[in-house]
Image: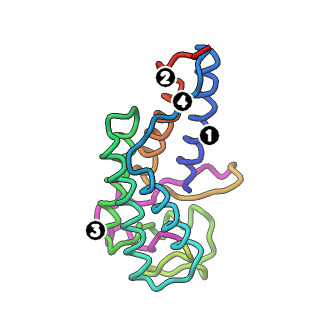
Amino acid sequence: MTMPLVVAATCGVITGFLRAAMRQRRLTIQEFRWRWLIGLSVLLLIAVTCIRLPDPIVSAALLLSQGAPLVFACLNRRQPGLWLVGLGLALNLLVISLNGGLMPISPETIQALGLPPESWAVEQRLGMSKDVVRSISDTRLWLLSDWLVSPAWLPSQGAFSIGDVIIGAGLFWVLWSAAGPIKNSN
């Protein structure tokens, strides 16, 4: 899970609980259709990052891991924040699709992360990640790739995309909204 998603989920849960407590309401997660698509996406991402698989299988799994929650977001778009999650997923799916099925990350971004030069090579998958190292000039829609870097003072540094930030904002909205209009039944 990328840093914006961890931060968004954490902040969303905390503010959702605080908002519910201040309004004397219960935190209520809405019923979502086709929830199993999220589980499928998580399983695919775990497989991609934890099991050494051939690159074509990784590419297909990564495309499906972005497409499945996009379908989920579309089916549940009337729920607060899910249309925003869907927009971020669509941006990520677009850049991944246009770049051979993996998320591009530039050598400059890798250097900003402090990874040793011997640990990566241009046009190769970056370790067991979802990323492929690709120069900015060879990346289609570079602005949508993993080029944002979390601050060095965080315990875990990583790169992420604008789509990840948008997904995080939508996720925050979904969790914050869980303290919505449903009143306490006491």
| Secondary element type, mark 2 | loop
Q: In 3D space, how far apart are the residues under numbered discs 3 and 4 (Cα atoms)?
A: 38 Å
Q: Amino acid at mark 1?
A: Thr
Cβ atoms at labels 4 and 1 below 8 Å apart = no
**Reading the chain from its start, which is encountered first: label 3 or label 1?**
1
Residue 33 in picture, x, y percent from top left: 38, 45
Disc number lying in front (2 or 1): 2
Q: Amino acid at mark 4?
A: Thr
The residue that mark 2 highlights is 180
The residue that mark 3 highlights is 98
Q: In 3D space, how far apart are the residues under numbered discs 2 and 1 (Cα atoms)?
A: 18 Å
Crowd around label 3: few <14 · some 14–19 · many ≥20 (10 Å): some
Crowd around label 1: few <14 · some 14–19 · many ≥20 (10 Å): some
The residue that mark 1 highlights is 10
Is residue 150 rendered magenta in the image?
A: yes
Residue 138 in picture, x, y percent from top left: 32, 72
**Reading the chain from its start, which is encountered first: label 3 or label 2?**
3
Cβ atoms at labels 2 and 1 below 8 Å apart = no
The residue that mark 4 highlights is 28
Cβ atoms at labels 4 and 2 below 8 Å apart = yes
In this picture the colour scheme is rainbow
| Secondary element type, mark 4 | loop
Q: Residue at x 59, y 47 (%)?
A: 6
Q: Residue at x 56, y 34 (%)?
A: 12
Residue 53 in picture, x, y percent from top left: 50, 83
Cβ atoms at labels 3 and 1 below 8 Å apart = no
Say if 13 sits above or below 92 in the image. Answer: above
Is residue 115 found left or right of 77 in the rendered image?
Answer: right
Disc number lying in front (3 or 1): 1
